[in-house]
Image (spheres, rainbow, N blue to C red):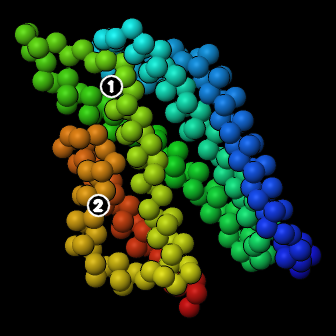
């Protein structure tokens, strides 16, 4: 009750000041993490090359290696600091939440992080090795696979981030089911439309090749079914 009164007594300028404070903290956190990641960028790059041990990276212009490493450091910092940045967002919105809502937000926050990093782990250990082996299979005696560092980092980072995002699907479905926007019967009836949307989403989020799109579409189908199950569980709880 006291927290609710504090929120009501805050002016728009107080909210903007608090938002500014949270954004500054997030920016500083990402910047510090990016500097640290850049100091260890060679180790990070070697980690990303483990799924392709025989791959030789090249750069075709003087600044390409440096810009690619800077981009890699920033992307690694964004991934590493995600839980800390989400905490800042939670601190900003927490005063406006009711006690019952706060009890839901914490498990939601933990599940969001768990699913995000689960998607990254799934992609790193299963999807990327398969994709690299497939594309390396086109090598011949007259065709040597030499990837530029920029293209390889873009390919790997887009896959990792995309899978981290799509693994949120069951959680999003569960949340929408909890607040009554989605129902399990609706999701089951519109499964064929969902398949079409999944194919489109996979084409947008992945690099422009069919294999990467298939490797994303298949897990998305399983995640869709998991989302239906989660919505069904929320319906049973409410009933």
Name the residue that disc number 1 marks: 151
Residue shown at 75%/51% (left/top)? Answer: 20
Q: Is residue 120 left or right of residue 29?
A: left
Question: Badge 1, how many Cα within 10 Å: few under 14, some, many 20+?
Answer: some
Query: From what the image shows, is residue 107 above or below residue 157?
Result: below
Query: From what the image shows, is residue 211 above or below residue 232?
Result: above
Name the residue that disc number 2 marks: 198
Q: Does the CB distance between marks 2 and 1 fall below 8 Å? A: no
Q: Which of these two is toward me, 107 or 15?
A: 15
In the rendering, at what x and y percent does residue 201 appear?
31, 56
Q: Mark 1: which secondary structure?
A: helix
In the rendering, at what x and y percent does residue 197 appear?
27, 64
Q: Quadrant of residue 186?
A: bottom left
Q: Earlier in the sequence, mark 2 or mark 1?
A: 1
Q: CA distance from mark 2 to mark 1?
A: 25 Å
Q: Which of labels 2 and 1 is toward the front?
A: 1
Q: Is residue 198 left or right of residue 106?
A: left
Q: Is residue 124 visible?
A: no
Q: Is residue 64 visible?
A: yes
Identity of the residue furthest to the right in this view: 2
Q: How many marks on residues?
A: 2
In the rendering, at what x and y percent does residue 215 appear?
27, 46
Q: Is residue 75 left or right of residue 134?
A: right
Residue shown at 47%/14% (left/top)? Answer: 66
Q: Mark 2: which secondary structure?
A: helix
Q: Is residue 232 left or right of residue 104?
A: left
In the rendering, at what x and y percent does residue 96 appear?
77, 72
């Amino acid at each position: 009750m006291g927290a609710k009164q504090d929120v009501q007594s805050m002016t728009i300028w107080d909210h903007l000041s608090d938002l500014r404070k949270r954004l500054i903290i997030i920016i500083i956190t990402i910047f510090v993490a990016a500097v640290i990641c850049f100091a260890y960028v060679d180790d990070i790059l070697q980690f990303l090359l483990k799924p392709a041990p025989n791959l030789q990276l090249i750069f075709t212009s003087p600044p390409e290696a440096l810009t690619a490493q800077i981009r890699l450091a920033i992307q690694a910092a964004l991934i590493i600091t995600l839980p800390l940045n989400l905490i800042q967002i939670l601190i900003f919105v927490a005063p406006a939440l009711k006690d019952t809502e706060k009890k839901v937000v914490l498990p939601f926050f933990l599940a969001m992080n768990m699913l995000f990093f689960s998607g990254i782990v799934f992609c790193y250990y299963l999807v990327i090795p398969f994709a690299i082996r497939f594309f390396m299979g086109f090598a011949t005696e007259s065709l040597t696979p030499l990837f530029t560092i920029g293209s390889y980092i873009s390919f790997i980072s887009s896959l990792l981030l995309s899978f981290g995002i799509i693994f949120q699907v069951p959680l999003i479905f569960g949340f929408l089911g909890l607040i009554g926007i989605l129902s399990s019967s609706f999701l089951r009836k519109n499964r064929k439309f969902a398949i079409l949307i999944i194919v489109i989403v996979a084409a947008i989020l992945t690099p422009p090749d069919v294999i990467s799109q298939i490797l994303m579409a298949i897990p998305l189908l399983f995640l869709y079914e998991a989302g239906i199950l989660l919505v069904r569980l929320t319906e049973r709880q409410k009933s």
